[in-house]
Image (cartoon, rainbow, N blue to C red):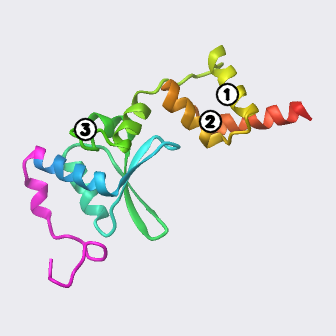
Amino acid sequence: MDWAERTTFNPVKMDWMLLAPTKFRLWFLRGVADSDGHVNVRNKIVEITSSPNTHFFHRLFESLSIKNVVRFSRGYGYVALAAPDAARIQIFSPVILTYRRKMLEKLATAKTFQGPWPKWLEELVQGLIAKGLPAPEIRNIILEDHETYVKIQTIKRKIRKTISLAQ
């Protein structure tokens, strides 16, 4: 880059990285994720803010055969990976147990239930609803404490049903 250029505004000129050894590419992406990535629990993905290098990062992931999706929102580019894929490659540093890595590992390995919930989960959710907790907080408690993933929409539906029965 030229002296006056900044990665905030100017894309890097690093196509050579696409030919670097696999472990170098992966550690480079880990560094980017550790600084500019986050776990999107709602969508079960890891997003890495990547403007103005969105397409470069996309190509870098592709060079490692890692499925990823490019997204743009509010003028910023993101590269998104499914949580299980991100956990498999340890996108957040495997050396330091950060909050992001811990959340990703819980999300990637969380139990889910199709159809009727087990009694313990139903009772837990009803108890949290009775405390007046909002749906995102209920979801996070269930994930953190019980390693189980429940969609926010499902919790919101249960909240509405509980409120309508109380009226």
Of the two numbered discs 1 and 3 in the rendering, the one whose residue sits closer to the viewer: 1
- Is most of the magenta stretch helix, strand or loop? loop
In which quarter of the view is residue 135 placed? Answer: top right
Question: Where is 104 relative to 70, above or below?
Answer: above
At horizontal 25% and vertical 38% (from top left) the residue drawn is 89
Q: CA distance from mark 2 to mark 1?
A: 7 Å
Q: Which residues are magenta?
A: 1-23
Mark 2 nearby-residue class (10 Å; few <14, some 14–19, many ≥20): many
Amino acid beneath label 2: Ile
Q: Which residue is drawn at the image coordinates 66% and 14% (left, top)?
A: 119
Say which element carries label 2.
helix
Q: Which residue is mark 2?
A: 138
What residue is pinned by disc 3? Answer: 89
Can residue 158 be seen?
Answer: no
- What is the x, y in percent for residue 162? 80, 32
Name the residue rendered at 29%, 51% in the picture.
Answer: 34
Residue furthest right as drawn:
167
Q: Residue at x 60, y 40 (%)?
A: 137
Q: Are marks 2 and 1 in contact (CB under 8 Å)?
A: yes
Q: Position of residue 48 (x, y in %)?
A: 35, 55
The amino acid marked with disc number 3 is Ile
Asked if residue 138 lies left or right of residue 100, the reply is: right
> Tag 1, which secondary structure?
helix
Q: Does residue 52 show up? A: yes
Judging by the rendered image, the residue that carries numbered circle 1 is: 125
Residue 142 falls in image quadrant: top right
